[in-house]
Image (spheres, rainbow, N blue to C red):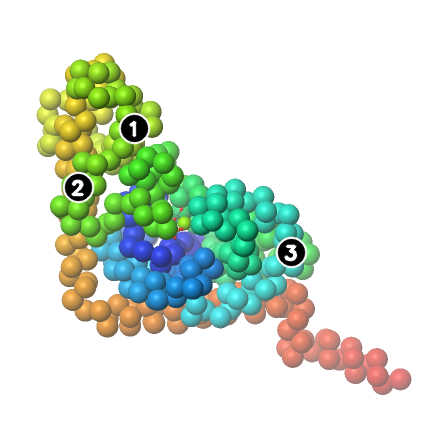
Amino acid sequence: MAKIILTGDRPTGKLHIGHYVGSLRERVKLQNSGTYDKIFIMIADAQALTDNADNPEKVRQNIIEVALDYLACGLDPEKSVIFIQSQIPQLCELSFYYMNLVTVSRLQRNPTVKSEIQARNFEASIPVGFFTYPISQAADITAFQATTVPVGEDQMPMLEQTREIVRKFNTTYSEALTEPEILLPGNEVCQRLPGIDGKAKMSKSIGNCIYLSETADEVKKKVMNMYTDPDHVRMSDPGKIEGNTVFTYLDAFCNDEHFGRYLPDYSNLDELKAHYRQGGLGDVKVKKFLYSVLMEYLEPIKKRRTEFEKDIPAIYKMLREGSQKAEAAAAETLAAVKKAMRINYFDDIDLINGQIKRYQK
Ligand code: ATP
Ligand code: MG
């Protein structure tokens, strides 16, 4: 069986370091491993509109931002098909048929959608499109017969929903769809990076982010203001690591070599944590270290982004070509789906012959 990747991002803002460790870094690695037959990367504008219906301009403006962040991180349109969701009409058709295979109560149980409804204050008036976006996401994944979906932990319920739809479809009609596997980052903190406020997951729609394209000054300011341990007031106080966002980010980003380069008094993160717990280590020192580590990742990304920003028409051309390739792939699946459901009337000679016989009496 061909190995196929589908994943993507909503164009609701620039991409942040949560995206990087949660999914982007993994995608680039998989892309360059050469072990996948096809890779599809989707800018999910139609999904972004489900909770931004009154602000299409936000979505429109952020498509280029996401595309630039992709290229800056090393996604390569020669190896990965990068496309825009709304340009693939087959995705809507697939969603329409999948809706019949899912119950309202099943959708109501989705924990990610539940917490997103709360974060967006939708409790009293949930848009139908938003409520049903896990079904549209199943269409996105299955349209490309994806076997592998590299995403963060918040996507687990979506993958489970997709797998249920695939099983239901294949048993109700006939085997036309592939059941995908989720691929989470191996490092647990990377599966759901918290925001700089230390509360919810880092999320564009909440705004608690460090963006990949931020200037060094902006990153420094954010790191210096980051949430740590509120009881660690004086340097001599013992500090807590659990729930301390600065240490969470170090867990996600730093390795032993970083200590040699930026903090040679310690040889690894365990030593640094032990000192912090014991007392006598100030937040500022740890934050400065985190800043240096982050900049080691962010500086080259920003440099490459600046290069790509010089030719914006080339980015739109790349997206247009990617969308054409994606549409061709989705059209094949839609044809197989219609055939499995036996609603491909005009190609079904047996159906037509059967009706002729019925009326020949
Ligand atoms: P929005 O607030 O608009 O939903 P977002 O910040 O949640 O934006 P998405 O576009 O929804 O970003 O997510 C894109 C991908 O990045 C998904 O695979 C998701 O799992 C992953 N991701 C998003 N935020 C994080 C995070 N904080 N940690 C790890 N992975 C994340
Ligand atoms: Mg999200």
The disc, 3 or 2, on the residue closer to the chain's N-terminal end is 3
Residue 39, quarter of picture: bottom left
Determine whether the beta carbon of the residue marked 3 sits less than 8 angstroms from the nearest atom of ligand 1. Answer: no
| In contact (CB < 8 Å): disc 2 and disc 1 | no
- Spatial separation of the CA atoms under disc 2 and disc 1: 17 Å
Q: Is residue 40 visible?
A: no
Residue 333, percent across and down? 53, 65
Measuring 17% from the left and 41% from the top, which residue is drawn there?
221
Q: Nearer the viewer, mark 2 or mark 1?
A: 2
- The residue positioned 22% from the left and 16% from the top of the image is 237
Mark 2, Cα crowd under 10 Å, few <14 / some 14-19 / many 20+, is few
Q: Amino acid at mark 2?
A: Lys
- The front one of 222 and 186 is 222
Q: Is residue 55 visible?
A: yes
Residue that carries the numbered disc 2 in the rendered image: 221
Instruction: Specify the quadrant of the image occupied by residue 344.
Output: bottom right
Q: CA distance from mark 3 to mark 2?
A: 49 Å
Q: Name which residue type carries label 3.
A: Leu
Look at mark 1 in the image and give the residue it sits on.
244
